[in-house]
Image: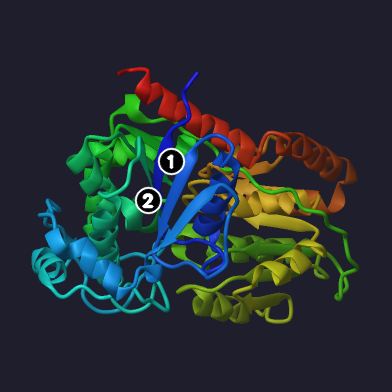
């Protein structure tokens, strides 16, 4: 059995600052690992008085100028490689960027410039690449003065400091891959983020993709060594819910998530058009924001479906739960989905789920109806069947309820500890 280890973990999103899917997953794993290991979590920004029992949470925004000056009295030489980056609009971890220039000058400027306290309002506004580099510079200096047995990094925003510390200390590096640039941009994703992911996978001792589907992407599109890949599905916290009366007549079919190419919103609209030919009283909700939101609004208007569709924009957790409590069918037609936690959230509310085969969650939700995203006819048929056939609804919900028993953060944490153990067994 693996002796209790000191885990140095890097995260970018973290509640309550950001509660997106990456932040929720990072927090869920942290809380479940607290009884199993000594975890020090390094994040860009933490909120005063927000603590997790038995987890040492370090927000770089809490390191003041005096402490920074002490850390940088003897600054290390960095070995970060040159990579390409886009100029211009800001971008986040789930949006596409293109290859246009080399980042060597940006690295030089940041790593040889004046050190300032890491005070940041929005992690994804402005020059995100600069923020990622500043995060690496400060966190490496800080972490070289602490003891740890293993390095664990969540997604590309944290890979730079994790790679540097692996090189400096020789400690094992574990990458937790929640999403890849290939998922977001497809075959044409050869940019700075893709390059960083590829280099990190080559250096890592183990790679934890959130599904076998994502693990295959790491091997096929990044050249990762198959023997490094150890998939661990996400968990979810149990919720109590009550089904509420709908404020509209007819059935309610929902889609929620980023309205981007990756999520397949156009397939949802095309399927809805076919469903409405059979059930004209059905209403559809597209909850979320993204670069395809306006085109989807325009498409439904062109089809004459404006009174059948509701576009809500971004919904916070409370509002999303209220939507789930009145929904009849949940749809996730993602073109590429590393996991798909939203589908599990829908299952918790006893809703029949229709999900794409190109998703990680399809590996764990055995009862869900699974589609090829391009097969709009089958998609529409499944929505109609979920509305009409009570026996089908019951069997889908029952099978997914059984699956929920194993989709826990406790199971996830145990498997992550098994990944660590596989590394130390080789020593």
Residue at horizontal 60%, vertical 50%?
A: 53
Would residue 291 appear left or right of 204 to someone viewing this image?
right
Which disc number belongs to residue 199? none
Give the residue pinned by disc 2.
Answer: 180
Residue drawn at 72 percent across, 37 percent down: 367
Q: Which residue position is annotated with label 1? A: 214
Q: How is the image coloured?
A: rainbow
Mark 2 is surrounded, within 10 Å at the Cα level, by few (under 14), some (14 to 19) or many (20 or more) other residues, namely many
Can the viewer see residue 171 in this picture? yes
Q: What's the CA distance linking mark 1 and mark 2? A: 8 Å
Q: Is residue 292 above or below residue 182?
A: below
Tag 1 and tag 2, C-beta contact below 8 Å: yes
Of marks 1 and 2, which one's residue comes earlier in the chain? Answer: 2
User: In the image shown, does 242 or 310 lie closer to the viewer?
Assistant: 242
The picture places residue 126, in percent across and down from the top left corner, at 32, 79
Badge 1: residue crowd in 10 Å (few <14, some 14–19, many ≥20) = many
Q: Is residue 173 above or below residue 126?
A: above
Q: Position of residue 192 (x, y in %)?
A: 22, 59
Identity of the residue drawn at 44% across and 48% down? 40
Marks counted in the figure total 2
Q: Secondary structure at mark 1?
A: helix
In percent of the image, x 10 and y 69: which residue is there? Answer: 112
């Amino acid at each position: 059995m693996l002796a209790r280890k000191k885990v140095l973990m890097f995260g970018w999103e973290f509640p309550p600052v950001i509660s997106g899917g990456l932040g929720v997953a990072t927090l869920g794993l942290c809380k479940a690992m607290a009884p199993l290991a000594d975890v020090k979590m390094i994040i860009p920004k933490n909120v005063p008085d927000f603590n997790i029992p038995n987890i040492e949470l370090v927000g770089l925004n809490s390191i003041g100028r005096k402490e920074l000056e002490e850390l940088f009295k003897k600054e290390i030489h960095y070995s970060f490689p040159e990579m390409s980056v886009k100029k211009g609009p800001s971008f986040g971890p789930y949006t596409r960027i293109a290859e246009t220039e080399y980042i060597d000058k940006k690295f030089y400027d940041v790593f040889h410039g004046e050190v300032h306290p890491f005070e940041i309002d929005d992690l994804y506004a402005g020059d995100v690449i600069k923020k990622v580099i500043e995060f690496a510079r400060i966190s490496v200096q800080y972490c070289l003065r602490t003891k740890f047995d293993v390095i664990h990094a969540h997604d590309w925003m944290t890979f730079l400091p994790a790679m540097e510390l692996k090189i400096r200390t020789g400690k094992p590096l574990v990458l937790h891959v929640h999403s890849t640039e290939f998922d977001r941009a497809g075959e044409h994703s050869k940019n700075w983020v893709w390059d960083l992911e590829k280099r990190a996978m080559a250096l890592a001792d183990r790679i934890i993709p959130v599904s076998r589907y994502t693990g295959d992407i790491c091997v096929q599109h990044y050249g990762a060594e198959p023997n490094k890949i150890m998939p661990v599905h996400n968990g979810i916290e149990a919720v109590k819910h009550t089904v509420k009366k709908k404020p509209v007549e007819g059935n309610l079919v929902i889609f929620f998530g980023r309205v981007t190419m990756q999520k397949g919103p156009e397939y949802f609209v095309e399927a809805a058009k076919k469903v409405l030919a059979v059930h004209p009283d059905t209403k559809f909700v597209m909850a979320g924001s993204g670069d395809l939101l306006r085109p989807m609004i325009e498409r439904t208007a062109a089809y004459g479906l404006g009174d059948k569709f509701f576009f809500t924009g971004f919904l916070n957790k409370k509002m999303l739960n209220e939507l789930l409590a009145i929904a009849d069918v949940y749809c996730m037609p993602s073109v590429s989905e590393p996991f798909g936690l939203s589908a599990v959230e829908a299952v918790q509310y006893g809703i029949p789920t229709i999900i794409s085969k190109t998703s990680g969650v399809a590996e764990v939700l055995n009862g869900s109806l699974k589609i090829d995203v391009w097969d709009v006819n089958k998609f529409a048929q499944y929505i109609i069947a979920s509305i009409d056939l009570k026996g089908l609804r019951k069997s889908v919900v029952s099978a997914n309820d059984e699956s929920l028993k194993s989709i826990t953060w406790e199971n996830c944490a145990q498997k992550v500890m098994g990944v660590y153990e596989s590394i130390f067994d080789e020593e």
